[in-house]
Structure formats: structure tokens, C-alpha cells
Amino acid sequence: MTGFEISGASAADMELIRRWADEEGWNPGDSDRFAFAVADPAGFLVGRVDGEPAACISAVRYGSDFGFIGFYIARPAFRGRGYGIRLWQAGMERLDGRLVGLDGVVDQQDNYRRSGFRSAWNNVRHEGVPRPNGSGGGAGGSAGGGAAFEVVDAASLPFALLAAYDRRFFPGPRDAFLSAWTGLPGRTALAAVRDGRIEGLGVVRPCSGASRIGPLYASTPAVAAALLHRLAEHTPDGAVAVDVPDANPSATVLVAGLGLEPTFEAARMYTGPAPEVDLAGMYGVTSLELG
């Protein structure tokens, strides 16, 4: 494989990777790369053939024992020539000794199984303009009785509370990533609060297609619906896309009831037992690329 070299991604490479993902139909966020870069600056690899970018992968480390694979793309002109598998091996070596997760597109899942990954659930993207309902666009609601919850700008809350809440749904610390993900210009982060407790969190970000919501965490379907409607108000045309874990049946029922249609599917897969996270409160995963 003369002339093939693997190196860390530059800032220019990160924009190139975003364009490649867009061409694959994955609809990446316009500014996602800025949050991705701080998650693990050395976690993005590019393979070049005689200096020409040919393939990419992300192999991001979280804490001391978890990692996530994403952005595994070989350009069409370079497929079938062994470059992709070389890059895959480099990414997996970087995560050696860790539990590794990924979101595998349907036509690659058998390959991932041969590499030791096993399916935990499916993340199904639902898209559309959410139709109004009784728990939708207001400032808050009762969320099943008791004191009302309030939807607030997530930036108004102590970041330590947001980070602790996020850890219920993700198996590793990612404070730097979360700070950038919720605070980048052009995106909106909202939290549902009741009696001083966070009961939901959602972020919407602009994309080349429908604006994507992720994460979408909530204590109840009513909280999730309120956040989703409020986030949709911050999009150009009200259209949103949410990657919904089918391991939370309430989430699937909610988005279907709001008129969102399934358009894309990927399997959440791990190299070992799936980590314990609050799936019942996960209505939309943060990112198919970094978990």
C-alpha cells in the first residue's frame, strides 16, 4: 500500500470530513466539528494516498475506559483497495483496552459484527415539522402532575448541573464537548426545570437539511414534547430531525404522534456489554458520530 499515510486531522480536514458526511446523506451539523475537536483533539484521523485525502475515521476517547468510533468514510474512488480497513485498524488501536461504541449504518453492520461489535438498540431518525399538541409550545406544564416545569435557556443554569445530568445518559465524562455543544453560536439549548431539578435537556443545531435535535432528554413524554416544540421554534422552517433510540418505546410513540417520519436508521453497537444509561429518559441521542 505504497503512498498511503495516516495522520491526525487538521482544522481544514475537519471541514472536509463534514462535507464528506454530508455527501453520504448523514446531514451533519454546520458547526459540529468545533465541538468534536475539543472532545478529543487527537481523535480524528485522515488517510491520504500520495497526499490526497482518501478516507477518515474518528476514534474519540472518553475518560479512561470508553471510546466511540464515527465518521468512518472512504471516498468512492478509493473503496475496495484496503485503505479503509487500514484506517479502521488505526482507529481501533487508538481505543485499545476500552469499551467501544458506534452507530453503524445498515449496510455495514455485518462488518462491525465481524470486528466484535454487537447491537444494543437502533437509533431511528425521525424528521418533519412537529404538529401541535396539548403539551407543546408553552413555557411549561405539569409533566404528569405536581409542580409545573419551566423551559429555560440551558446557559442560565450552572454548567456543573448540566454536566451531571448528561452523565445519566452517556457512559463517560465529556464536559469540554458538552460545553461547546450547548454553547456554539447558531444553536439553541433548552432545559426543563422543576423545583430546582433538571428534568429535560435539548439542543437544536442548523444543518444542510432539517435542523437536528440532539440530545433530547426528558423525565416524561410531556417534557420531551415541550422541549421538542420549543426547539423547533428556533429553526428556519420548523422542520427537525431527531435520532430516536427504539429501546425507549415512549420516544418512538411520541415522535410518531407528532407526525415525524422515519428516514434513516443506525444500530448502536458495542464491543462488550452495553453501558448502563437512562434509556427511559433518552428521547434523542446527541450525535451518531460521537455518541
Image: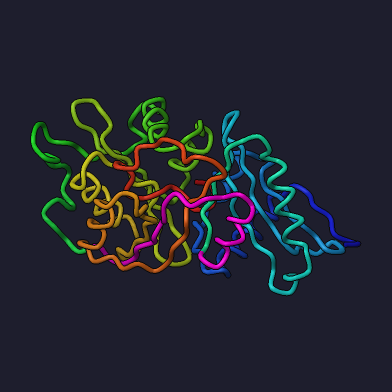
Residue at the image position 47 percent from the left and 56 percent from the top: 267
Residue 11 can be seen in this image = yes
Is 244 left or right of 195, judged from the image as shown? right
Is 151 left or right of 146, judged from the image as shown? right
Its colouring scheme is rainbow
Position in image of residue 195 (x %, y %): 18, 26
Position in image of residue 43 (x %, y %): 66, 43
Split into 4 quadrants, where in the image is the N terminus?
bottom right
Q: Nearer the viewer, residue 14 or 77?
A: 77
Residue 193 drawn in magenta: no
Q: Residue furthest left?
A: 145
Residue 152 can be seen in this image = no
Q: Is residue 186 above or below residue 96?
A: below
Residue at the image position 23 percent from the left and 56 percent from the top: 254
Q: Is residue 101 above or below residue 252?
A: above
Instruction: Classify residue 276 by image quadrant.
Output: top left
Is 119 left or right of 165, judged from the image as shown? right
**Residue range highlighted in magenta:** 106-130
Q: Is residue 186 above or below residue 166?
A: below
Residue at the image position 57 percent from the left and 62 percent from the top: 110
Position in image of residue 252 (x %, y %): 28, 57
Q: Residue furthest right?
A: 2
Q: Nearer the viewer, residue 170 or 240?
A: 170
Residue at the image position 50 percent from the left and 33 percent from the top: 172
Residue 119 drawn in magenta: yes
Is 93 left or right of 163, judged from the image as shown? right
Give the number of marks.
Answer: 0
Position in image of residue 244 (x %, y %): 36, 55
